Image (cartoon, grey):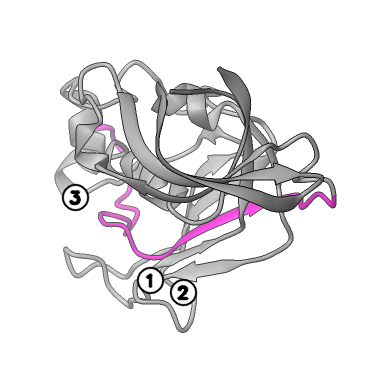
């Protein structure tokens, strides 16, 4: 069935997969989800921004230097989901005739979007857990993950269900974001709000 879905926490693990595929070398060698895209291409939804921010305080990824001991710099990866940068080490920056950017590694990830008071409107499902992220297919980027969920009625939890599966494609999933809440969840090196998604496939 297709329905509206609201993730409480574990969608961060799916965001992590996006980050794994933003390395300049893996993109250049066609080993990345984003190899067919260039800087300036629109990939996802158009109303939020993703930043690699080593300057955020009180997060586990706060750092003065990246992994090559270059001064770490705040870098916008997606500006309203237009691809604006990659993770460049010194070698790959030179290959693209770029001045080294100081963003060879993931530091703190900050997701910025316009919050909506109606982020739960139409949502019937609240996921509380997703498991088996290793099952994501690295060639097609499709996944089928087991989870636990609540059924929502007018934004309130009713029934609790175990052993449900969410099946989709990573890019299509992040292109189906419905809205953001005004909360900010901190999980290690992530500063992100809760999200609601639409038109997902549930088994």
As measured in the structure, the alpha-carbon distance from the residue carrying label 1 to the one carrying label 2 is 14 Å
Taking the magenta stretch, the answer to whether it contains residue 59 is: no
- The disc, 2 or 3, on the residue closer to the chain's N-terminal end is 2
- The disc, 1 or 2, on the residue closer to the chain's N-terminal end is 2
Residue position for label 1: 188
Residue position for label 3: 90
Q: Residue at x 34, y 71 (%)?
A: 61
For the residue pair 190 and 7, the one nearer the viewer reads as 7
Q: Are marks 1 and 2 in contact (CB under 8 Å)?
A: no
Give x and y (percent) for residue 190.
45, 63
Residue position for label 2: 55
Q: Image check: 150 left or right of 202?
A: right
Above or below 38: residue 186: below
Q: Are marks 1 and 3 in contact (CB under 8 Å)?
A: no
Give x and y (percent) for residue 115.
77, 52
Q: Residue at x 16, y 63 (%)?
A: 68
Above or below 57: residue 188: above
Q: Which residues are magenta?
A: 96-117
Give x and y (percent) for residue 116.
81, 49
């Amino acid at each position: 069935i297709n329905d509206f879905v609201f993730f409480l926490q574990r969608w961060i693990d799916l965001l992590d997969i996006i980050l794994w595929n933003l390395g300049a070398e893996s993109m250049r060698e066609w080993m990345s989800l984003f190899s067919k895209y260039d800087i300036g291409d629109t990939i996802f939804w158009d109303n939020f921004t993703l930043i690699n921010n080593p300057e955020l305080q009180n997060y586990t990824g706060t750092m003065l230097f990246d992994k090559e001991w270059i001064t770490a710099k705040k870098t916008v990866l997606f500006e309203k989901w237009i691809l604006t940068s990659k993770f460049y080490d010194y070698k790959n920056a030179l290959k693209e005739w770029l001045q080294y950017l100081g963003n060879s590694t993931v530091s703190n990830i900050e997701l910025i979007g316009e919050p909506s008071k109606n982020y739960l409107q139409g949502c019937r499902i609240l996921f509380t857990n997703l498991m088996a992220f290793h099952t994501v297919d690295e060639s097609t980027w499709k996944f089928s993950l087991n989870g636990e969920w609540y059924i929502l009625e007018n934004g309130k939890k009713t029934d609790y269900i175990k052993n449900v599966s969410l099946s989709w494609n990573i890019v299509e999933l992040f292109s189906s974001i419905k809205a953001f809440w005004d909360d900010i969840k901190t999980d290690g090196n992530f500063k992100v709000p809760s999200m609601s998604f639409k038109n997902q496939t549930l088994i």
